[in-house]
Each structure stands twice: as C-alpha cells, then as structure tokens.
Amino acid sequence: MFDCHARSVFGFLCALVGRRDLAEELTQETFVRAYERRATLRDQAKAAAWLLGIARNISREQARQDRRWDSLDDLFEDEEQPARTSEPLPDATLLDAELRLVVRAALAKLDADKRLVFVLVFVLRAFEQRSYEDIAAITGFSIGKVKTDLRRARLEMRR
C-alpha cells in the first residue's frame, strides 16, 4: 500500500501544510495510523481516498498544534531557482520560475478549507479521475460545499 500511495499522500500533505519536512513526518504518521486501522478499510478500491482522509485529519491536528499553517516557504525548497547572473535567462525558465512563485503565493492566501478542496480536486480529479463524491467523503464536506469552495478557490487563485 505504501509504495502505491506514498507519493500522492506526500504531495497532498505538502500542499496542505506547506513544509516538506513536516509533510514527510505527516506522511509517515498517515501510514502508521492506516496500518493501525487497516481493519476499517472496507473497499480496497477506495484505499487512496481512505488514506487521504487520514492524512487530512492528521494535517488538521498538526495545524492546531502549529500555527504556521500558511507558511509555504519550504514547499518548493528543492526546486532550482533561476540564478541571478548578468546573463539573461531564457524566457521559458523565467516564466516557469515566476509562475511557481505566483502559484505558491496564491495557495498561501487560501483559507484552509479552500486549500484542502483545491488540492484534493487537483490531485484526485486530475490524476486519479476521482468523483466529487470521493472528495466529499475525504473532506467530510457536502458535495455542494466542495463545489462552492472549489469555485471560490479557483476565483482566488486566478486573482
């Protein structure tokens, strides 16, 4: 189970908590709790949703303990930033770096519920073709709230 889902759980937690080191710890905690509660998994096909639900709960617990919830400084720490030299950078590299900074800043401005829904929709709908019902089950929100928060998050991200 770990090999199949660790990357998506880590990416999800990284986007939620904004710190790679903390996301690594929370990913480990997610799988420890999943192992302890493996008897509660009823449908193997929904293991990803079940794991992300556990990860969401762990990230909320962490947010209560650590009020640096909106710090996304370490999210992209290992990504190469364009070097400041006298030589002009290629347009694609410069645009990529600017886009990363804009997206990081926009994510930091979203409130926790909107960030959760936005990240889940991005990860689950785009990469795993999951339904809004699955996302609602993971978040514990109604389908209407998921869609509303997603709409509002998209509008805020566009701004």
Image (cartoon, helix red, strand yellow):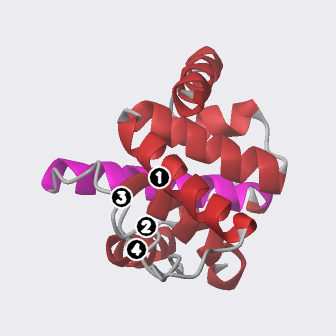
Q: Mark 1 sits on what residue?
A: 104
Q: Mark 3 sits on what residue?
A: 72
Mark 1 and mark 2 in contact (Cβ < 8 Å)?
A: yes
Observer-nearest of 30 and 19:
19
Mark 2 and mark 3 in contact (Cβ < 8 Å)?
A: yes
Residue 99 higher or lower than 28, as above or below:
above
Residue 6: quarter of image: bottom right
Q: Check disc 1 and give the amino acid type.
A: Arg
Mark 1 and mark 3 in contact (Cβ < 8 Å)?
A: yes
Q: CA distance from mark 2 to mark 1?
A: 8 Å
Helix, strand or loop under label 3: loop
Q: Mark 4 sits on what residue?
A: 20
Residue 50: quarter of image: bottom right
First in sequence, mark 2 or 1: give its number: 2
* Local crowd size for mark 4, using a 10 Å CA cut-off: few (<14), some (14–19), many (≥20): many
* Local crowd size for mark 3, using a 10 Å CA cut-off: few (<14), some (14–19), many (≥20): many
Q: Check disc 3 and give the amino acid type.
A: Leu
Residue 158: quarter of image: top right
Left or right: 91 with respect to 114? right
Helix, strand or loop under label 2: loop
Left or right: 38 with respect to 71? right
Q: Nearer the viewer, mark 4 or mark 1?
A: 1
Identify the magenta region. 45-65
